[in-house]
Image (tube, rainbow, N blue to C red):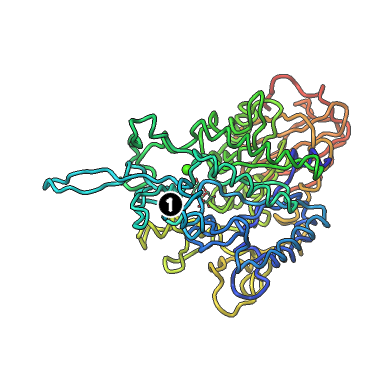
Amino acid sequence: ASDLDWWKTALVYQIYPRSFKDSNGDGTGDLNGITEKLPYLQETGIDAIWMSPIYRSPNYDSGYDITDYRSIQEEYGTMEDFDRLLNVSRGLGMRVVLDFVPNHTGNESEWFSKSTTRTSPYTDYYVWADGLNATDENGTLYEKPPSNWVSTFRGSAWQYHQVRGQYYLHQFVIGQPDLNYRSDVVQEEMKNVLRFWLDKGVSGFRVDAINRLYEADPRNFSGLYPDEPLSGAEGAVPDDYEYLQHIYTENLFETYDVVYDWRDVLDEYITSQGEYKIMMTEAYADLQLMIRYYGTKTRNGSIPFNFSFLGDINKDSTAWEIKTVIDKWMTYMPSGNVANWVNGNHDQSRMANRQGVDRVDAMNMLALILPGVAITYQGEEIGMTDGYVSWNDTQDPQACNTNDPVNYYKKSRDPNRTPYHWDGSANAGFSNTTGATWLPVASNYQTVNLAAQMATQKSHYHFYKDVAAQRKTPALQEGDLDTRALSESLLVVTRLLPGEAGMLGVVNLAAEAQTIDLTSLKILPSDLEVVASGVNCALEKNATLTKSSIPVSAHCA
Ligand code: TEU
Ligand code: CA
């Protein structure tokens, strides 16, 4: 793909820097560790790496609480290390995508501290509000937070600040004050953060928690922040995120314009750097709200992450259900846009746990052969599983805030953040520390690791790499998509270009082998070539496959 079109079919690999590769033996991953492994990623067929936040942060939320957007986290290295990483990537023909966290800074940032003292121009950088007067049962006066809003990670979303004498909003942890996008100064400031990294030559951004950018404007509610209606969720207690609906705090219409404005900033670089920049936005939202991030008739936007593989496909999903999940995105996506398929991230349980070890190859194949961008979270190419993290070792605030040493794991994102398994040596080859790694290595690293999978022909890794190599063929770059469930356990995906070689992906969800009579389906003539096969799936190529050989209505054997 050309420099202008590269993003339309990019295979993006998400690196979680703390857990990828530790180069200096302190038990925490770092930039030099990533740089060291770039040749491996290139060999695997990765087009771009997206790194979770690498900026200075006290790690109240694993780096998503940023102290300074223009700095590098000390334990990850220096700005020189970053520049080298960028250069080495470029030399290998790979692109670097950064995590942009616009909804909140960390509370250790200079912006926040100056805002607490009302120092210009930072006075209105955050969402500040006065408390409300209330009386308790005994008639005693007290002050309560401006609204009933709760943080994603439990408790009130408002935190009183002594110095300022007001409450500030934090949709996530207390150390993550929400920025105020009703301030033009903030709008400008954040565009300049984008420009800082674009000037360095990064190829785009993954945008964090975009749906949280705006909250209801008190000017529309008699000067007050409106309470969220109750959700009615079973078992949820009042300080749970699930207890409330989030109509006043998520996907407000103002948010979309900001995304389109950022797109314009990114487009400033098309001419100067001769490259189109990618923007992928993270929002857990209804499909209708989600697809608006793509843009409008007059304005371009971003690629909203498609989380349907994470949320809507499980161990028991049938071929019909998987087909429906795929078709849904393709149907809702406004035409002319780029689809995308996410098979994991640092917030969700791993594929091997969610969909089962037997379905790892199938899920990887589907993401890689469907049209558009494919996003692989580190470790999914070798089928890593969630690791065990004890209550004492738990780092994730979402788990810690439960204060529940028994059930914390239900909320914990640490199991899917454990260090990458490079080989079967100590610490899975992640770190040569003699102390503890920042999170414990999963116990199965001696059987599930990259070196072992490279050494055998039949492995998740080899299958992934074979399919990734096929992404460069015209059929997978531009071929028309057709999905078909032949039974509840057989799924067929074709990518066809008229008169050219086509690709056929077959997924077998049954425990036993199955035979499909492809000729009866008029899908394929005789010279079928298997180019990659996994535990329960195969990718096949045929040189004479033509679009006209596809029947109009699906015929199921
Ligand atoms: O996640 C945004 C988000 O909505 C999360 O609350 C998500 O629903 C949750 O983690 C699922 O368990 C982003 C980042 O991906 C996440 O790691 C951060 O903690 C969060 O933003 C705050 O920056
Ligand atoms: Ca916000």
Seen as rendered, the residue at the extreme top is 552
| Residue 395 falls left or right of residue 225 | right
> Against 398, is 549 above or below?
above
Q: Give the amino acid type for the residue marked by disc 1 in the picture.
A: Arg
Dividing the picture into quadrants, the one containing residue 437 is bottom right
| Residue 33 placement (x, y as % from top left) | 69, 67
Specify whether 150 is left or right of 212. Answer: left
List the single residue furthest toward the left: 138
Q: Quadrant of residue 544?
A: top right
Disc 1 target residue: 118
Q: Nearer the viewer, residue 373 or 32?
A: 32
Depicted 234 relative to depicted 418: above or below: above
User: Which one is in front, 552 or 307?
Assistant: 307
In this orientation, does residue 464 appear? no
View extreme (front): residue: 120
Q: Position of residue 299 (x, y in %)?
A: 66, 28
Image point (51%, 30%), residue name: 253
Residue 456 located left or right of residue 349: right
SS assignment at label 1: loop
